[in-house]
């Protein structure tokens, strides 16, 4: 099933032409001109590294120089899904994260097969965070693949700085998320300005209050992890990494929930991270010896089951068939 999904006819996918063009045109290195604008300064270069998603272009230039564009797209799909699988293989129960990746409506069927820049960025972030225990580095590299992850980078830094202060991290992340929502327009203008006019604020993520409620519900496992003691037997480096990812998760959801009311476009463009960051956090939730953890786990399973059934009825999983 997995192999058949990767090998599907991709011509009907909306963004397929864009990715094919990336691999066809980027070997000419014309994209590098955007990194050196008129009036060059170190500030403009730093912003350009993120807004122009330089590591994505490095990838497409390298792969596009070796393979046909359509083949390079399929290789990218395989690599990003392999990285996702390898990133969770050392967790206590790697089957659950992989099941989440396959079942989440924004998981494999979307970011794993269609939205390749987002998926590739997520895969790099999780692999470096979970396999190398370097969540800040992973988020930094992800932000240079897809600019959405530039929002997650400050939360990762907060999580690292506050790693020994269990309560301070989530509080600072929420405060930073609220602040980022208020200046969201400026952030998107700086880091996503060249594509800003192509985005739509009329998406379910930006117009349905149920989406906000769902995002807040998704924050519960991360909040619980940050406010409770570590699971017995969980390695200390892994615990710190998961706590950092939980801080990122809480911060992103604070941004999404606030943006819904004051900057709907932000909720629509970043909201998918509310569910995707459950992949490493929910399966590692302390639940077997803690009734609160078990309650949160069961509540999230019910919510995700509802989403999966709804997505199935809407035809989102037809690709599996």
Image (cartoon, rainbow, N blue to C red):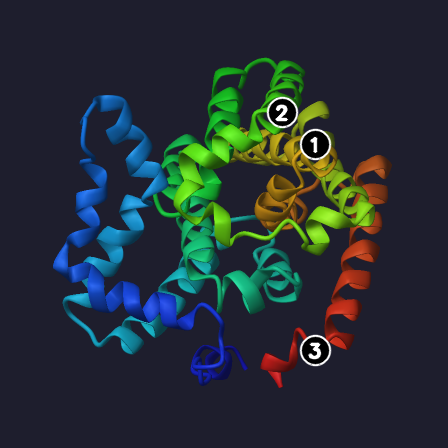
**Is the C-beta separation of discs 2 and 1 under 8 Å?**
yes
Q: Nearer the viewer, residue 273 or 97?
A: 273
Residue at screen point 67% across, 41% down: 264
Using the image, tell me which numbered label, if any, was put on residue 170. none
Residue at screen point 64% across, 59% down: 100
Can residue 237 be seen by looking at this rendering? no
Element under disc 2: helix
Give the image location of residue 238, x and y in percent. 51, 35
Q: Nearer the viewer, residue 167 or 96?
A: 167
Residue at screen point 44% across, 52% down: 123
In the image, residue 175 above or below residue 195: above
Give the image location of residue 267, x and y in percent. 65, 42
Determine whether, in the image, residue 185 is placed left or right of residue 72: right
In the image, residue 72 above or below residue 11: above
Element under disc 3: loop
Determine whether, in the image, residue 249 is placed left or right of residue 308: left
Q: Residues within 10 Å of mark 1 (few under 14, many from 20)?
A: some
Report how far apart the C-alphas of labels 3 and 1 lie in the structure.
Answer: 32 Å
Report how far apart the C-alphas of labels 2 and 1 lie in the structure.
Answer: 7 Å
Q: Residues within 10 Å of mark 3 (few under 14, many from 20)?
A: few
Which residue corresponds to mark 1? 262
Residue at screen point 41% across, 47% down: 146
Dot 2 or dot 1: first in sequence order is 2
Dot 3 or dot 2: first in sequence order is 2
Which residue corresponds to mark 3? 315
Determine whether, in the image, residue 318 is placed left or right of residue 311: left
Q: Residues within 10 Å of mark 2 (few under 14, many from 20)?
A: some
Q: Specify the quadrant that holds the C terminus.
A: bottom right
Q: Nearer the viewer, residue 13 or 103?
A: 13
Using the image, tell me which numbered label, if any, was put on residue 182. 2
């Amino acid at each position: 099933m997995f192999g058949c999904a990767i090998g599907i006819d991709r011509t009907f996918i909306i963004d397929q032409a864009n990715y094919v063009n990336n691999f066809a045109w980027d070997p000419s290195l014309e994209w590098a001109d955007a990194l050196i604008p008129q009036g060059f300064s170190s500030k403009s270069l730093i912003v350009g590294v993120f807004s122009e998603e330089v590591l994505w272009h490095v990838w497409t230039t390298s792969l596009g120089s070796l393979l046909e564009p359509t083949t390079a797209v399929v290789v990218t799909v395989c690599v990003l899904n392999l990285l996702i699988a390898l990133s969770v293989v050392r967790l206590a129960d790697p089957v659950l994260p992989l099941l989440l990746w396959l079942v989440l409506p924004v998981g494999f069927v979307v970011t794993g097969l269609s939205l390749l820049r987002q998926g590739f960025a997520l895969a790099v972030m999780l692999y470096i965070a979970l396999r190398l225990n370097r969540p800040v580095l992973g988020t930094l590299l992800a932000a240079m693949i897809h600019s959405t992850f530039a929002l997650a980078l400050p939360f990762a830094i907060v999580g690292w700085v506050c790693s020994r202060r269990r309560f301070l991290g989530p509080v600072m992340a929420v405060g930073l998320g609220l602040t980022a929502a208020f200046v969201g327009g400026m952030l998107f203008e700086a880091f996503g300005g060249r594509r800003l006019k192509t985005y739509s604020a009329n998406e379910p993520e930006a117009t349905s209050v149920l989406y906000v409620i769902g995002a807040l519900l998704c924050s519960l496992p991360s909040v619980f992890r940050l406010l409770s003691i570590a699971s017995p037997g969980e390695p200390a480096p892994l615990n710190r990494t998961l706590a950092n990812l939980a801080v990122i998760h809480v911060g992103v959801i604070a941004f999404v929930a606030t943006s819904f009311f004051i900057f709907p476009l932000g909720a629509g463009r970043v909201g998918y991270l509310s569910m995707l960051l459950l992949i490493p956090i929910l399966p590692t939730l302390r639940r077997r010896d803690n009734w609160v953890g078990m309650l949160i786990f069961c509540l999230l399973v019910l919510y995700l089951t509802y989403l999966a059934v709804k997505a199935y009825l809407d035809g989102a999983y037809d690709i599996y068939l």
